[in-house]
Image (tube, rainbow, N blue to C red):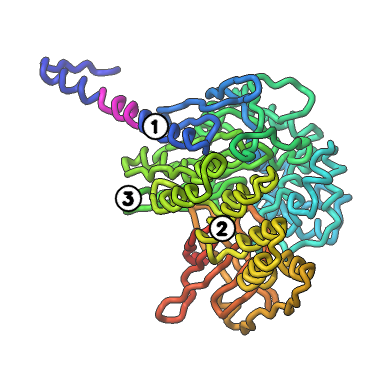
């Protein structure tokens, strides 16, 4: 029986003040979060819905911008967004439920459940391999021309499975991490095979209905879905509708929609044993390679000036017109959910700033993108004035420069017939990012269009100097009648290459894994296909798939301790963790 305690008047007053403090703190934090998100919105860096929970209780939820820009319908906390790869944690939960029922085994092989699957690979790949992206199955979204040739067509799961099932593995199962939508697509097929039901039905019966996630579901093309956000992507100063994607393609790897409110219910359920046992959850959240568990990234993060790192369990998603993140700090039951419907918001930086607010740490103010300012200036003012303004913005720490965005502005101006303005923008970009081969390659194209052959040759040669494998630069110089020497990379011995093999962590759930095959070095970033690294010296390498370079750093003892990724004018260090 609850005991009644009588307090003297002054003690009761003190107690009331004390009891209201947490509410006041929460309100203060909510105001700070709102002010922070408003800055991103003002910078045109976010358009979506936000939910933040502290110690398991929602302290903030709000929508920003438009769910439908054509009908001027606002985003709200119950707006439904496509989740992209956040879907994977739901698929992983369905698999774990079937494991606990004895229907599937984590050590079971694909061919144990799909006898018609190619035995050469299916006999090697286990359910565990599929869940942890260590199966070696090539990632279908990385196939050449995939989004142009296949992503718009509807497929039955069994039919689409055949597009990659016969392909050779990229590596021996279990030996490496390689993010693969193919693996989670295959898990969906396995779920349907062993249950005799559709993936959508199994999901509804085993997760959505029990948790009353009424605003979550498989985004099928036929049914009407109320409060569903439209997807957009930035183009120039505005937005365009995102390219069509048939949702039978992402399937169990990325086809769900949900709301920030439903994802809060999902988060809370993960603190209970309602869906699987405690031991099942522990298995699901134990990372294997590259900090990846079953449908979740699991890592450590520093928040502001805090001495100790926090365990962070999270996953992001990206799908035509949407990007998303759900981030959990289980120790303190903190939750950040960000759902965006304009394609490419800086969600990781936003999440990190929200965590700083939750832990009473100073916020890093969002930097204003410089590109929109340059666009407005170059279209309305003399080029000399734009240069003056650009140099002032560049020196101001409140502004952020992105090489790729400025480069895109140059092409935008060129396509609008504003060639002098385009050349001015390309030149500003080259001055801001003098070590990027792409800025010279782009300006070379503008000079060619302007009929300045000498300047075009100069820029294409500079681009090849910085990236000898810039095939476009080579092709254009040949068209201009210039002799081009075959690029010769530096020669690095096998022992040095082997010393670079390992995993380098650039963010809590983002790493680059370096591997060696004979005399070649390869890298693979979390969620991306492998890429080859070409040496310019013993420690410096470049990529030819994107404009980026990698430098390996050694300590005084000669041990490789980190790599630095140079991209978009930024130097991003990654500590060696394996």
- Report if residue 28 lies within the magenta region: yes
Q: Are marks 2 and 3 in contact (CB under 8 Å)?
A: no
Can you give x and y, in whole percent of width and height, for residue 350 in the image?
A: 46, 41
Magenta region: 20-29
User: Looking at the image, is 368 positioned above or below residue 60?
Assistant: below
Q: What secondary structure do most residues of the magenta stretch adopt?
A: helix
Where on the picture, by quarter, is residue 423? bottom right
Q: Secondary structure at mark 2?
A: helix
Q: Are marks 3 and 1 in contact (CB under 8 Å)?
A: no
Mark 1 sits on what residue? Answer: 35
Seen at 60% across and 23% down, the residue is: 212
* Whether residue 8 is situated above or below residue 303 in the rendered picture: above
Left or right relative to 91: residue 1: left
Q: Is residue 292 something that shows in the picture?
A: no
Q: Kindly identify which residue carries mark 2.
A: 427
Decide: few, some or many residues near mark 1? Use Cα within 10 Å; few <14, some 14-19, many ≥20.
few
Which label sits in the foreground, 2 or 3? 2
Q: Which residue is mark 3?
A: 306
Q: Earlier in the sequence, mark 3 or mark 1?
A: 1
User: Which numbered mark, 3 or 1, is in the foreground of this view?
Assistant: 1
Of the numbered discs 2 and 3, the one sitting upstream in the chain is 3
């Amino acid at each position: 029986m609850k005991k009644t305690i009588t307090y003297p008047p002054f003690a009761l007053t003190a107690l009331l003040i004390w009891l209201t403090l947490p509410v006041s703190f929460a309100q203060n934090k909510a105001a700070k979060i709102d002010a922070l998100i408003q800055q991103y919105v003002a910078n045109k860096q976010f358009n979506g819905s936000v939910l933040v929970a502290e110690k398991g209780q929602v302290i903030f939820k709000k929508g920003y911008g438009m769910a439908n820009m054509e009908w001027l319908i606002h985003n709200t906390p119950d707006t439904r967004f496509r989740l992209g790869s956040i879907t994977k944690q739901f698929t992983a939960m369905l698999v774990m439920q079937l494991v606990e029922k004895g229907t599937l085994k984590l050590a079971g092989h694909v061919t144990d459940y799909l006898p018609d699957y190619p035995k050469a690979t299916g006999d090697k790949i286990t359910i565990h391999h599929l869940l942890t992206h260590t199966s070696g199955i090539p990632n279908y979204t990385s196939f050449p021309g995939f989004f142009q040739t296949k992503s718009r067509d509807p497929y039955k799961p069994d039919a689409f499975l055949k597009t990659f099932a016969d392909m050779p593995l990229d590596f021996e199962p279990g030996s490496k991490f390689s993010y693969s939508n193919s693996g989670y697509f295959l898990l969906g097929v396995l779920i349907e095979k062993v249950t005799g039901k559709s993936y959508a039905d199994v999901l509804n019966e085993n997760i959505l209905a029990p948790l009353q996630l009424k605003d979550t579901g498989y985004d099928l093309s036929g049914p009407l879905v109320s409060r569903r956000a439209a997807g957009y992507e930035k183009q120039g100063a505005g937005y365009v509708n995102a390219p069509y994607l048939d949702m039978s393609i992402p399937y169990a790897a990325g086809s769900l929609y949900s709301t920030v409110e439903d994802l809060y219910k999902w988060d809370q359920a993960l603190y209970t044993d309602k869906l699987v046992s405690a031991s099942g959850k522990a298995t699901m959240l134990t990372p294997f390679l590259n900090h990846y568990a079953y449908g979740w990234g699991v890592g450590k993060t520093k928040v502001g000036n805090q001495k100790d790192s926090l365990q962070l369990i999270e996953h992001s998603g990206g799908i035509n017109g949407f990007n998303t993140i759900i981030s959990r700090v289980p120790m303190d039951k903190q939750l950040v959910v960000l759902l965006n419907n304009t394609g490419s918001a800086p969600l990781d930086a936003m999440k990190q700033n929200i965590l700083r607010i939750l832990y009473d740490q100073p916020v890093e103010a969002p930097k204003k993108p410089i590109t929109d300012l340059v666009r407005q200036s170059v279209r309305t003012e003399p080029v000399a004035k734009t240069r003056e303004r650009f140099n002032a913005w560049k020196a101001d720490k409140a502004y952020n420069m992105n090489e790729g965005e400025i480069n895109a502005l140059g092409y935008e101006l060129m396509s609008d017939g504003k060639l002098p303005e385009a050349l001015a923008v390309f030149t500003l970009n080259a001055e801001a990012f003098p070590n990027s081969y792409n800025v010279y390659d782009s300006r070379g194209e503008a000079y060619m269009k302007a009929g300045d052959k000498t300047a075009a040759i100069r820029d294409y040669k500079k681009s090849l100097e910085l990236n000898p494998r810039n095939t476009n630069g080579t092709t254009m110089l040949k068209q201009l009648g210039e002799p081009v020497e075959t690029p010769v990379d530096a020669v690095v011995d096998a022992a040095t290459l082997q010393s670079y093999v390992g995993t380098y962590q650039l963010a809590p759930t983002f790493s680059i894994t370096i591997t060696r095959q004979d005399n070649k070095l390869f890298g693979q970033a979390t969620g991306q296909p492998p890429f080859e690294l070409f040496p310019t010296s013993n420690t410096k390498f470049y990529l030819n798939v994107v404009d980026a370079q990698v430098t390996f750093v050694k300590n005084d003892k000669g041990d490789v301790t980190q790599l630095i990724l140079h991209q978009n004018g930024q130097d991003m260090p990654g500590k060696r963790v394996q």
